[in-house]
Image (cartoon, rainbow, N blue to C red):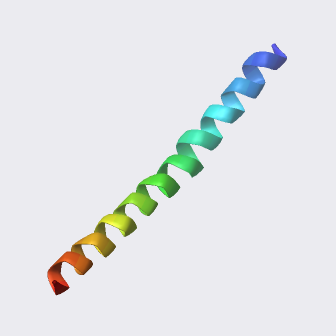
Amino acid sequence: MLWWSILAVAMVVFYVILTPFWIGLRVAAWLADQRARRKN
């Protein structure tokens, strides 16, 4: 029972917090790359 509780909490943390954070980082890096390419 404890294992399933820990697993559920870990999945919520991963999908609710870390995934949007990671996607945001990738979007920011992509935008910076686009701006750098446009200047050259």
Relative placement, left or right, of 40 versus 31 is left
Front residue of 8/25: it is 25
Relative placement, left or right, of 6 versus 21 is right
> Does residue 4 sit above or below 34 in this rendering?
above
Front residue of 26/15: it is 26
> Does residue 15 sit above or below 32 in this rendering?
above
Question: Considering the image in quadrants, where does the N terminus appear?
Answer: top right
> Does residue 15 sit above or below 18 in this rendering?
above
Q: How many marks?
A: 0
Q: Where does the image place residue 27, in percent across and percent down from the top left?
A: 35, 63
Q: At 16% from the left edge and 81% from the top edge, which residue is drawn? A: 38
Q: Quadrant of residue 39?
A: bottom left
Q: At 78% from the left edge and 17% from the top edge, which residue is drawn? A: 3
Relative placement, left or right, of 14 versus 31 is right
Q: At 58% from the left edge and 51% from the top edge, which residue is drawn? A: 17
Q: Where does the image place residue 21, in percent across and percent down from the top left?
A: 51, 57
Question: Considering the image in quadrants, where does the C terminus appear?
Answer: bottom left
Q: At 25% from the left edge and 79% from the top edge, which residue is drawn? A: 36
User: Which residue of the protein is positioned furthest toward the bottom in this rendering?
Assistant: 39
Q: Where does the image place residue 25, in percent across and percent down from the top left?
A: 45, 62
Q: Quadrant of residue 29?
A: bottom left
Front residue of 22/10: it is 22
